[in-house]
Image: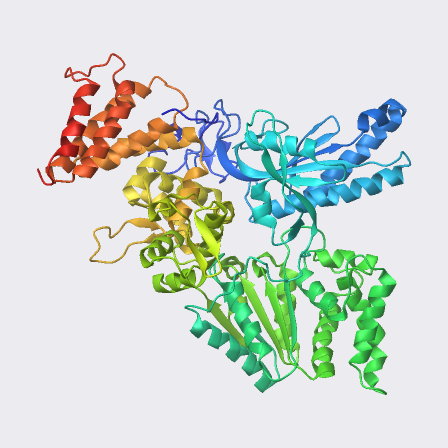
Amino acid sequence: MWGDGERGSTSPSASPAPSASGGPASSAPGARICPACGARSVDAANFCFRCGAALPGSAEPQPAERRFTSILFADLVGFTELAERTDAEDVRELLSGYFALCRSTIETLGGVVEKFIGDAVMAVWGATRTREDDAERAVRAALELTRAVGDYGRASGMGALAVRVGVVTDEVAVVLGAAGEGMVTGAAVNLAARLQGAAAPATVLTDAHTRTLTVDRIDFGREIRVAIKGIADEVPAYPALRVISETGSGAAPAAEILTALVGRDAERDVLTASFDRVVATGRPHVAVVSADAGVGKSRLVLELRDHLDHVPMAIMWHSARCLSYGEGVSYSALSSAVRSRIGSVEGESEAVALGRLRTKLVSWTPANSTQLDDLDWMCERLAPLLGADADGAPLLTSGSAGYGRDEYFAAWSLWFERMSAGENAPVVWVIEDAHWADDGLIDFVEHLRRENPAPVLIVIVTRPELLVRRPAVGVGENTTLLELSPLDEESIVALIAGLAPELPRDVLHLLSARVGGVPLYARELLRSLVDDGLLEDTVQGLRLAPGISARMLADAEPPASLRVLIASRLDALEPGARLVAQLAAVLGFSFSMPALAAVSRRSPGDLAADVATLETRGILISITDPLSSERGQYVFSHPLIRQVAYEMQSRRSRSERHLATVDFLESAPDEGSRAAAVIAQHLVDALQLQTAPSASTESAARRAVHWLLAAADSARRLGAATAATRLYEQAIDVWPLANPAGRDADGRTVRDLEELAREVATSPVGT
């Protein structure tokens, strides 16, 4: 019954009610501002009445959450010996530079340095906001540290320096708002430190989760086994060797399993028609492919690439992604397109890069043409995209150093025009992950669409956030907008059958229900089932492993990749909407507005904006079917979204919110008699989430037994023997907590319940 937990929570029952007028008591002396949503709260409040966040100066512990984070541990090798033979002041100066180098490297890649311990560094990705590429960032930072620290040691004149690094990705408890120490706790922290200790100098060791999340972009060595103190079996670890897909390269990930395109024929035809229009008109066209993560944007673009491979003409194809982190991110998708076209590679000198650029421009210029006169003008304005001109560096962070932006845009636009004319071919420029694009890049795309006279198809692949931020991107002349929805069930079944043709039809539908129309979820789920030994990969395709049932597939945990992806969607929400999603997750897969209002201690009108945001962002769906018994209620758009929103909360928070839900259900007219099993389950969940018995445990357990027995009796009367037996068995499990003396107020013992359970289990059906 008892499990591990974390200290601190944000409970709806702890939040003060709003003032009688329905708004905050903004005129109260000593009113404080909520750091999460900005609402003013009265001085006596510990939590914000609007969003539930802890207020500054609250006596309550800081709230905790459970998060899937990537943790990096790095340690200098041989530092003790170096310190013994080096003057103390020199050692201090060396360490100061080392710490500054570590912090800069980690923070550039979006990590947070949690602590320095002697000469060791601990950093975290995803502690306050989950990003889907947190694990990739952590491994990139680890590899960069091994290089940078070596260079630093050689430059310091004190001899060779090296670090060894461990990276682990797993669930931890995070104390929100903690500073300095104690922000992240859990077994993953210890494992990262142990892997670091097992790594060779100047190498990186990762755990299995990290490898699974990054194997498409990081090259790993063979698995090794590491003995960890306190763990009976050796732990598998994987040496990270190098980055194999440079940021912004646009290379298709290895995990992009290609099957026959399903459910997207119309969208494919629209996209290919956009290219045909570019060829026919000789003018630019923008095609925007918008959808949430995993719905099939990149797969549709790959279909365009395959189509163009069979077109009998030369086509200048470029593909690159926008960056969410690092230096020079503003025009990374354009920079990568230019670099790939001229054959430039990372790390080459300024002279070599500029030489490649000039050679390519000359090759596109007819002999004796007046176009030769402006080569210097173009090179000077294209050079910052190559990272070759130090003075142009601020440009890549959305500044406009050296020249005015109009001059840069004119030169970059001319690049596309000269390319198309010089190669006698239309140009395709695919911008992946455009939701991370800087406004400067989007401005250039609009300039290109409006001013360029060449046949250029610009394919913007984005999530809906970009269209919210820059709505004009998807409208206007020479623009096509494709908004992709999740696939229907039959299409998903066909997709899974293409990957696993030997699975029975009922298993295909079971898996389809788990992935909810999202192709990426289907692929990742199948991959994780193979990794866990539930499916076998054979020459005929995937099939059930020996001894594995369909039910075992249904109960398998969702893979870490999907949990991280969904958590990143939730973390992108405003704090108020995110909290509403978490509270709704406690209520269940479907819920009513009155229940949400009761648990959040906010009025339905006050909740309306946050609920509308969740609908707009595809988290919730309102049921409007007049024939549905649940009309007027809300459901989560996908079961995994509800599960992740639920599991992100601390055990204490979930337990208290389950109890608040029970209070509402018991007080609602006629709700209790119709929902005995639901009330009972909320109480059982609340008890299972508690870490140890408390003053309220016995009372909650008695309520649980009452409702479990009521639900069991109802099921028995309806002839549902299996359901009744299960409910009686749950009551038997809770009985000792409800009745420490062994008997209840009616004199019953647990043996009486056991006899009832046996009687129901052995009775004829319907009796």
- In this orientation, does residue 432 appear? yes
* Percent coordinates x, y for residue 602 in the rendering: 35, 38
Given residues 326 and 139, the one toward you in this image is 139
* Percent coordinates x, y for residue 408 in the rendering: 74, 68
- In this orientation, does residue 124 appear? no
Which residue is painted at 66% across and 78% down in the image? 452
Q: Quadrant of the N terminus?
A: top left
Which residue is painted at 73% across and 74% down in the image? 415
Up the image or down, 107 lies above or below 218; here it is: above
* Percent coordinates x, y for residue 552 in the rendering: 37, 44
Residue 731, picture quadrant: top left
Query: What kind of colouring is applied to the model shown?
Result: rainbow
In the orientation shown, which residue stands out farthest toward the top?
Answer: 741
Total of numbered circles in the picture?
0
Q: Quadrant of the C terminus?
A: top left
Up the image or down, 750 lies above or below 643; here it is: above
Up the image or down, 567 lies above or below 163; here it is: below
Left of 695 or right of it: where is 235? right
Given residues 148 and 199, the one toward you in this image is 199
